Amino acid sequence: MIQTKISAVSVYRSGCVISRETKVCLQEGFQSLKLLGPGPGADAESLRLSVPEGVQGAHVQLAYLREEEKAELLEVLQKKIGRLARRLDNLDEQIALWRTNADFSGKDNISIQEMTDFLEGLPARLEELEEGRESLREEKARLEKELAAQAKRLEFPYVSVDLVAVAAGEYPLELKYKDSAAAWGPSYELHAREEESGRLLLRLRAQIAQDTGEDWSRVKLQLLSGNPAISGTIPQLYPQTLHFYEPPRMLAKAAMAGAGAMMDMAAPMMREEAEENGMARSAASKFEMSQVIADSGRTIQGDTMTEYELTGLWDIRDGQSILCDIRSDEIPCRYQVVAVPRFTEEAYLSAEVKTADLEEMQQVEAAVYLKGNFAGRVFLQPDMTEETYYLSLGVDETVKAKRTQKKKYTSQVLLKGQKKTEYEFEIAVSSRKPKACSLLIKDQIPVTEEKSIQVDVQNLSGGEAEEETGIIKWDLTLQPGESRTLNLAYSVAWPKDKQITGF
């Protein structure tokens, strides 16, 4: 049996590819080898063995040891542990004997000098024996731990390979295979700078977890954004036929019985799903989390996925999860406070950025830090068809925007046969910032595609309205401690014999 060592790991969003290395002494001609290393999650179909020039390999496959082979490999350690156990028993007997001999009652023909010499030398002798016993216990515990680890490893598969060497010598071998028991996920952070800087720090971090059955010690790490577990098959289109819908005819009782039957059928599935979720939570909870701050690695944009090569060598224990830095980028932005008083009085600090700068951050959650302090989490979902995107950086408690309805009056326009409702709102904004504040206020008026519904704007207080969406924007600059009032007024008219909805 030949031991192999992990040299590098390529971790995907789900699963990983492990590279192992070893050196073997080969005789000229044909020989069969057994390579130890792969864990229980190794994919047999993904095994690849690289051999140097002068060596040919064949029949690379996973196999398992027979019980008698396991026993034979463990026998040496078991014998060592047995010998230590016997030596410990002997020491225990010696210590007990020395303590017994210290009792001189009932013993004749022993001089005072002999008893004195024995008692004076007893502590040193007992200390020597107990130190020896403690040393043997530590060695026995170490061997028992090694035996348990080796017994666990022997339950894992090994790689059987046939090699043919043109000449005798020492040759390097590299073994690669896919293992499903590892994964990584991106973790994004947004760090707001001083508003005058016009810069925003985007930090990409990776949470890496592995449960392959062995520790990764001093290995090269590469992260890939792809997921081999997802099918790469091109979807195929099939004919789509149209037909008229005919509702099923059934009595109410039959319908209720059918619904009950469906619930009965769904119950086992719901229980199974709950059990799977519980198992997933249990599996996740067994990972030990630690944080590692690392230098940024090298980013490579491949043809189908992004690769991140981490610098240095890494240690990740079996069952451990670590968090490490991948990349930090500073992008230009415009800091601005945004308020939508129709829904809330709260205002939000935001960074207006180019959407193209967030291409990698679509449909993800990010942690927000303001001047180094954690301010919450936001979900990023930029519309890549838009040129700019407003990144929310959390609530800004120094700015408030309150919307109050001042008027809602409905009347009938007799000559036109219409009903008409007039609306009027007042938006009061204020700033408690010690410096000038750039503030974007957003509100809206209803829009319609019906020609018989008319929306007329009476007052926007200088705001700009988008014709298609009805969204109104006020781009303001508030001085320290300044308050301002905006007015919004519009009317909606429609045929009096109809009802309208949507606003």
Image: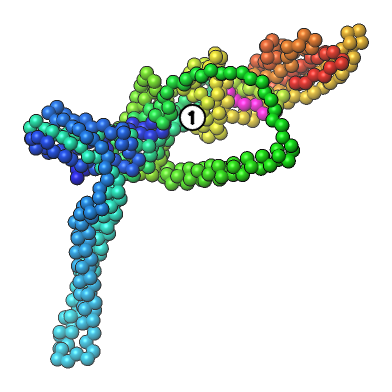
Q: Give the residue furthest to the right.
A: 414
From the viewer's perspective, is 359 left or right of 297? right
* Numbered disc 1: secondary structure: strand
From the viewer's perspective, is 366 left or right of 255? left
The N terminus lies in quadrant: top left
- Viewer-side residue, 89 vs 378: 89
Residue occupied by mark 1: 189
Q: Position of residue 285 (x, y in %)?
A: 46, 45
Q: Residue at x 53, y 42 (%)?
A: 273
Q: Is residue 315 visible?
A: no
Picture quadrant where residue 324 is located: top left
- Viewer-side residue, 272 vs 458: 272
Please tell me how crowded label 1 is: few (under 14), some (14-19), or many (20+) other residues with Cα within 10 Å: some
Residue 352 covered by magenta stretch: no
Q: Residue at x 85, y 13 (%)?
A: 495
Q: Residue at x 70, y 38 (%)?
A: 255
